Amino acid sequence: MGRLLELPPPDGDVDLASGSIFFVGNATVILRYAGFTVLTDPNFLHAGDHAHLGYGITTERLTDPAIDVEDLPPVDFVVLSHYHGDHFDHVVEEKLDRDLPVVTTRHAAEKLAEKGFRRTYPLETWDEIRIRKGDAELAVTATPGTHAPGVLSKALPPVMGSVLEFRRGDARPLVRLYVTGDTLLFEELAEIPNRYPDIDVALVHLGGTKLFGVLLTMDAEQGVEAVKLFDADTSIPIHYDDYDVFASPLSDF
């Protein structure tokens, strides 16, 4: 059994008949269902701004976000796949509420604590945290991910995918959603559909990110294989054209 995070109950009745996925840009989406509002990988830089990737490396943003960070609706918590400047940028570090819960990797939690964020919930692979809001519950489970092949992965921040299961009571999930995170296609991902065979929606990080010629996120070919592997009812590509390090556009996919 994982940890439990209790949130204040929602105001009024909760609509279980519909929800929404609002694409902000890059890997940033706003998920709304069962009374929850979840923000993923917050990145609100504008075209011409530069995100920091570590080791003095930056990448230029080519697009504007659909909304600015000041225009966010009230958010219950953040799911952060890893600590990279195109997933948690300096604008977010400055303007996001430091008491907002963030579910993320241990590495990212340590970095965020240094920036003054007080409510981080680090997960190792297959760890779970349950978030309860009234009589609805959302379980978030960290799934495998690797940001680079072989030993090069040690030079990049650890990354996680996440499975989000919305429940009311002990019945099967009302909705099961999977976010790949910035991972390449690798052997350990096969365990995800084994454990979660009925994925309703998959958000697939693409882009074919390359640094020094090395592939760091799934390109179109790997993305197609991932869609087959996870076999979600609906697969939505994200993270594909917002930065100049992306080498595999959505048209390829």
Image (cartoon, rainbow, N blue to C red):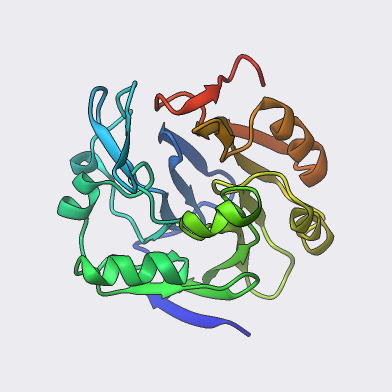
Q: Residue at x 53, y 75 (%)?
A: 129
Q: Quadrant of the N terminus?
A: bottom right
Q: Residue furthest top?
A: 251
Q: Residue furthest left?
A: 94
Image quadrant assignment for residue 107: bottom left
From the viewer's perspective, is 173 left or right of 69?
right
Looking at the picture, does residue 58 appear above or below residue 5? above
Q: Position of residue 130 (x, y in %)?
A: 53, 74
Residue 133 shows up from this direction: no
Residue 234 shows up from this direction: yes
Q: Quadrant of the C terminus?
A: top right
Looking at the picture, does residue 137 appear above or below residue 208? below
Q: Position of residue 68 (x, y in %)?
A: 23, 35
Image quadrant assignment for residue 222: top right
Q: Position of residue 26 (x, y in %)?
A: 43, 34
Q: Residue at x 49, y 27 (%)?
A: 246
Q: Residue at x 25, y 74 (%)?
A: 118
From the viewer's perspective, is 124 left or right of 76?
right
Q: Position of residue 70 (x, y in %)?
A: 18, 42
Looking at the picture, does residue 241 appear above or below residue 195? above
Looking at the picture, does residue 5 appear above or below residue 138? below
